[in-house]
Amino acid sequence: MAAVTTNSADVPGRAEEAAPGLPGLPGHPGAPGTPGGPEQSLRPPSPRRLNRRIRLRRDRSLLLMTVPVVVLLLVFNYLPLFGTVTAFEYYDPIVGVVNSEWIGLENFRQLLGDPLFWGSVWNTLELAAVQLVLFFPVPVALALLLNSVLSPRIRSFVQSVTLIPHFFSWVLVITLFQQMIGGAGLLNQFLRQHDMTPWNIMTDPSVFKLLVTSQVIWKDAGWGIIVFLAALAAIDENLYEAAAMDGAGRWRRMWHITLPGLRGVIVLMLVLRLGNVLNVGFEQLLIQRYAVGHDAADVLDTFSYFYGIGTNNYGYGAAAGIFKSVISLLLIYGANKLAHSFGEDGLYRK
């Protein structure tokens, strides 16, 4: 009989014994899928393993870019927070915060019993509601309108024209409105030429809130469309093509694709708007206050200025500012909870 030679590598279970150090076999340190294999040896080290010096050297440029922003936040947002202690004092700027007389909640008691304060609160809430209803949808509508324009040149031109007024000062904006609809403006000149009764809208308290809202829309609507245009650019174009092939028209594509794609951004901007809703424009109202009277134009900001700083009662004005901050915090918290109830992230995820 012929001798049969058997290769140990061909026998199952004996390959590891025949070549225990052969790379590539299961269990070998250099084999794929095992500790120390090619996948792990070529994997970059985790950022957590880098020491602080290496991370600072790596992110040095980014950190230097954030320094001006951090300084601005500290100087104009966080350092002034220490001045809120004046709301509990009869603050005297000559003796300073430390040596001023401590009166506790007396400024708040006086504030809650002041009818002028409650009048300014009511004006602020009314003006905030009007601006929320009339101003907030305008940037969304403009963004949808611009997104439907096919010509890039026309789109860029319209966006530039609507964006420019944002960089105008309120003095210039109110002057332009005065020249158009004021007592000697173009509108009243046209009415006089046709034997009609002129109407000085700029001095009419009954339409002052609508006037202020129209000024805000003309000035800031173009600036507000930037975020929504960015959100529209992130929507997949293949969705529109697939919907068009299925026979969906322009309105159905907008209702079922565009608006759902904008929903998260709209909710987020609405939450931020509600948190800032009580800031209805200090400079804008200050300029027009004497034309319509304090009963129509006084809001929380102007109340703090005229009845706090204007009368050297700084603690009283600081108390009004704290009241406004607390209400704004409650509004943004409630709006964020409402966004979570609709399944959106809001300012943060649950």
Image (tube, rainbow, N blue to C red):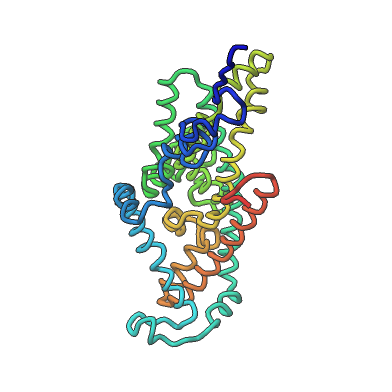
Regarding residue 139, the answer to whether it shows in the image is no
Image point (58%, 39%), residue name: 137
Q: x, y percentage for residue 350? A: 63, 52
* Left or right for 151, reference 15: left
Q: Estimate the x, y position of residue 271 in percent, counting from the top left.
A: 58, 50
Q: Residue at the far front: name it.
A: 1
Which residue is found at the position 56% from the left and 58% from the top? 124
Looking at the picture, does residue 115 appear above or below residue 136?
Answer: below
Q: From this viewpoint, is residue 33 visible?
A: yes
Is residue 249 rendered to the left or right of residue 152? right
Instruction: Please name the residue shown 51% across and 46% down the image.
Output: 201
Query: Position of 258 compared to 194: left or right?
Result: right
Q: Is residue 100 above or below residue 322?
A: below
User: Horizontally, is 169 left or right of 348 in the view?
Assistant: left
52 or 163, nearer to the observer: 52
* Tally of numbered tags: 0
Name the image quarter holding the N terminus: top right
The image quarter containing residue 286 is bottom left
Residue 110 vertical position relative to residue 284 in the rendered view, above or below: below
Front-lying residue, 193 or 318: 318
Question: x, y percentage for residue 292?
Answer: 50, 56
Q: Nearer the viewer, residue 167 or 37?
A: 37
Residue 69: quadrant of the picture: bottom left
